[in-house]
Image: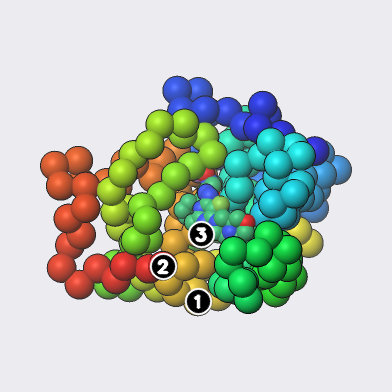
């Protein structure tokens, strides 16, 4: 099971490497890694389990973050399910479970390539964080709002999908990790919350 101690932090050179392509069929080690990365996301999105294992919540995790320089990332983007009663813990936990059980996008993307992307940009209203970056880096992180993504799944099957808004942003954050790019590389240091004209603010 992946724990926070297994996640390497900014300053570790692995985070700045361009990761190697993954060979198919996956060997046992890489198949286990894929399962462990997805399990991390699932556990981290369950408030009780996240507390128990002291995990920072995540909707994505890239292999370089556990010091494996391979082009593989797990993505688990839950649907936005609002709790019936936002002040009631049980209701919050139930909503999170419903969200987890009906993800917008759940996939281990291997050897991903963004084959085309919109000129239109999008950024998360809250800015971004990263499990591998302990410092806060406030500011909009501009990404393409829409992407066409080609990747292989665990069995090596090729997929070509179109994503927009939230799942597109998550995948771009993860694919950046495979190229040695960290989210704050994209922030306009002079004016962190000055998004280019027409940038969609998501969430
Ligand atoms: C947006 C968000 N980022 C969270 N963390 N950061 C991450 O995932 C990093 C990757 C994301 C940062 C911005 C885009 C991709 C991890 N990264 O470093 C991997 O490269 C969250 F945890 C989170 N959510 C919303 C959904 N909620 C469901 C219930 O459980 C809690 C969970 C919290 N949303
Ligand atoms: Ni990250």
Task: Give above or below for 153 relative to 17.
Answer: below
- Determine the residue positioned at 54% across, 39% down: 131
Q: Mark 3 sits on what residue? A: 171
- Along the polypeptide, which appears first: circle 2 or circle 3? 3
Could you say which quadrant of the image residue 111 lies in?
bottom right
- Determine the residue positioned at 29% across, 54% down: 140
Q: Position of residue 113 (x, y in %)?
A: 50, 60
Crowding at dot 1, Cα within 10 Å, few <14 / some 14-19 / many 20+, comes out as some
Residue 157 shows up from this direction = no
Looking at the image, which residue sits at the far right?
A: 28
Task: Give above or below for 47 relative to 86.
Answer: above
Q: Mark 1 sits on what residue? A: 162
Q: CA distance from mark 1 to mark 3?
A: 11 Å
- Along the polypeptide, which appears first: circle 1 or circle 2? 1
Q: Position of residue 149 (x, y in %)?
A: 51, 68
Crowding at dot 2, Cα within 10 Å, few <14 / some 14-19 / many 20+, comes out as few
Q: Nearer the viewer, mark 1 or mark 3?
A: 3
- Determine the residue positioned at 69% across, 51% down: 47
Q: CA distance from mark 2 to mark 3?
A: 16 Å
Q: Position of residue 48 (x, y in %)?
A: 75, 49
Report helix, strand or loop for mark 3: helix
- Say whether residue 113 is left or right of residue 1: left
Quick check: marks 1 and 3 in contact, CB under 8 Å? no
Determine which of the numbered discs, if any, sits on residue 203 in the image. Answer: 2
Could you say which quadrant of the image residue 86 lies in?
bottom right
Q: CA distance from mark 1 to mark 2?
A: 19 Å
């Amino acid at each position: 099971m992946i724990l926070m101690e297994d996640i390497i932090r900014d300053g570790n050179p692995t985070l700045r490497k361009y990761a190697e392509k993954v060979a198919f069929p996956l060997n046992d080690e890489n198949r286990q890694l894929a399962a462990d990365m997805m399990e991390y996301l699932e556990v981290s999105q369950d408030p009780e389990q996240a507390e128990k294992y002291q995990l920072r919540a995540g909707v994505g995790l890239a292999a370089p973050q556990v010091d494996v320089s391979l082009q593989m990332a797990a993505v688990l983007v839950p649907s936005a399910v609002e709790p019936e009663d936002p002040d009631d813990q049980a209701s919050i936990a139930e909503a999170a479970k419903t969200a987890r059980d009906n993800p917008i996008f759940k996939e281990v993307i291997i050897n991903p390539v963004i084959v085309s992307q919109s000129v239109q940009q999008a950024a998360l209203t809250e800015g971004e964080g990263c499990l591998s970056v302990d410092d806060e880096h406030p500011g909009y992180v501009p990404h393409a709002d829409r992407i066409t993504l080609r990747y292989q799944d665990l069995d090596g099957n090729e997929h070509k999908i179109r994503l927009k808004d939230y799942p597109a942003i998550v995948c771009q954050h993860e694919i950046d990790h495979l190229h040695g790019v960290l989210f704050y590389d994209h922030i306009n240091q002079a004016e962190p919350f000055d998004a280019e004209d027409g940038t969609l603010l998501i969430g």
